[in-house]
Amino acid sequence: MSDTGHVTRDRRIAGLVFDLDGTLYDKRPVERYVIARMLLSFGRLRRYTKVRQSLAGADLGSGEAIAAETLARLASGAAEREAWRRWIAERYEPLVLRAVGRAGRAQDGAAALLARLRAAGLRLGMVSDYRGADDRLRAIGIDPGVFHFRLVTEEVGAMKPAARVAALTLEGMGLPGERMVMVGDRAFADERFAEACAMGFLGVLAGGAPAGPGWMPWSQVHARLSGLAG
């Protein structure tokens, strides 16, 4: 359900669900900031990124279980897993938050758009796979409270597009999927998640070729969503 050609004219749309990283802010400057400060451990960073991507759609039942599975995919021995755990908690995650605060910025007009959409009566949701989402929202100048529903999938032990994440989102938004649009930047996670929820989809394109008709630069996404605010 990725046909978004009439999103600005469809008054049946009552809710919007947003991804965060790469959607509400351009993550490319953030990634460059992180890489520049992790040149000596770039291999470790690349491995961690690949393992996180391999968990797309996984449902381990709890935050503790998905953390354990992540470490198990990174290393076989207990000592090495503990080293990975400390690297993630003490180095990687604090660096990412610092990078968002120093190199990241909200997409043009994003904060004002969210306020207008909420004032127009649309329900707003934010579903992110990565913990610390509220801190990253504040770092780019967006009040987490603008969203009626927020879900960090890692905290419940699942990743988009897992069926349980879809169910939790539909329940939390209080709307059928057919009356909502998902806005994201990853085809393998966000677009598939929209399909799992039977939502429409708008893909935020950050360079490169579009993955389908629903993909466009943020400026066009902004224009389409603005039409919903009246």
Image (cartoon, grey):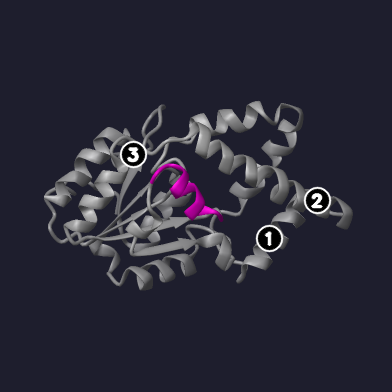
Q: Are marks 3 and 2 in contact (CB under 8 Å)?
A: no
The percent coordinates of residue 105 (x first, y second) are 42, 36
Query: Does residue 39 lie above or below 44 as drawn?
Result: above
Between the C-alphas of marks 2 and 1, the distance is 12 Å
Q: Which kind of residue does numbered mark 1 sit on? A: Ala
Instruction: List the residue tagged with mark 2.
Output: 75
Q: Are marks 3 and 1 in contact (CB under 8 Å)?
A: no
* Disc 1: which residue: 67
- Left or right of 185 on screen, residue 156: right
> Is the residue marked by circle 2 packed among few (<14), some (14-19), or many (20+) residues within 10 Å?
some
The relative height of residue 191 versus residue 222 in the rendered view (above or below) is: below
In the image, what residue type sits under mark 2?
Ala
Residue at image location 57% in from the left, 60% down from the top? 154
> Residue 132 magenta-drawn?
yes
Is residue 5 visible to us here? no
Image: magenta residue range: 131-141
Q: Quadrant of residue 50?
A: top right
Helix, strand or loop for disc 3: loop
What residue is shown at x 21% (from left), y 62% (from top)?
A: 14
Q: Secondary structure at mark 2?
A: loop
On-image quarter of the N terminus: bottom left
Q: Nearer the viewer, residue 156 or 52?
A: 156
Residue in the foreground of this view, choosing between 180 and 136:
136
Label 3 or label 1, whichever comes before in sequence order = 1
| Residue 41: quarter of image | top right
- Residue 161 is labelled as none
Sooner in the amino-acid sequence: mark 3 or mark 2: 2
Mark 3 lies on residue: 212
